[in-house]
Amino acid sequence: MKAISPYITILQNNIFFRLYKHYIIDSILIIKTHGVRELFKRRGKKFVLVIFTYYLIRDSIIYILIPYCVARGLL
């Protein structure tokens, strides 16, 4: 059990974990209690921008970068 605790401490100090903990979980709670419309009222354009950016990066890696690397023989 002691071997796991340093990893948990590092994870809790990680900026992405804090973002997930506060922003995403809070957004899920807003959707469950008040609905999607209330989420867009509270988060607005920033929320849509975050979702768009996430999918843009993810799809660029999946559909452009990985096939390119496979075609070049890098993977």
Image: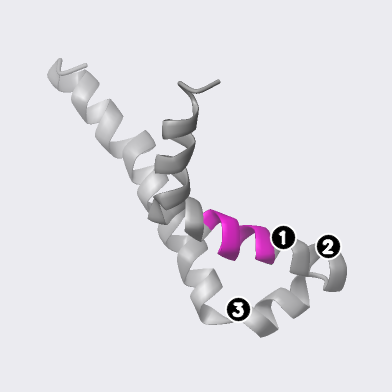
Identify residue for label 2: 32
- The earlier-in-sequence mark between 2 and 3 is 2
Q: Position of residue 60 (x, y in %)?
A: 33, 44
- What's the distance in space between the residues labelled 3 and 1, CA to CA? 12 Å
- The earlier-in-sequence mark between 3 and 1 is 1
Q: Is residue 49 above or below residue 28?
A: below
Q: Is residue 19 left or right of residue 56?
A: right
Q: Position of residue 67 (x, y in %)?
A: 28, 27
The amino acid sitting under disc 1 is Ile
Residue 49 seen: yes
Q: Is residue 23 above or below residue 61?
A: below
The crowding category of the residue bearing disc 2, from other C-alpha atoms within 10 Å (few below 14, some 14 to 19, many at least 20), is few
Label of residue 18 in the image: none
Residue located at (49% from left, 57% from top): 18
Residue in front for this viewpoint, 9 or 45 = 9
Identify residue for label 3: 43
Q: Are marks 2 and 3 in contact (CB under 8 Å)?
A: no
Q: Position of residue 45 (x, y in %)?
A: 52, 80
Which residue range is magenta in the image?
Answer: 20-26
- What's the distance in space between the residues labelled 2 and 3, CA to CA? 15 Å
The amino acid sitting under disc 3 is Arg
Outermost right residue: 33
The amino acid sitting under disc 2 is Lys
Q: Secondary structure at mark 1?
A: helix
Magenta stretch containing residue 22, yes or no? Answer: yes
Q: Are marks 1 and 2 in contact (CB under 8 Å)?
A: yes
Q: Position of residue 2 (x, y in %)?
A: 50, 23
Q: Secondary structure at mark 2?
A: helix
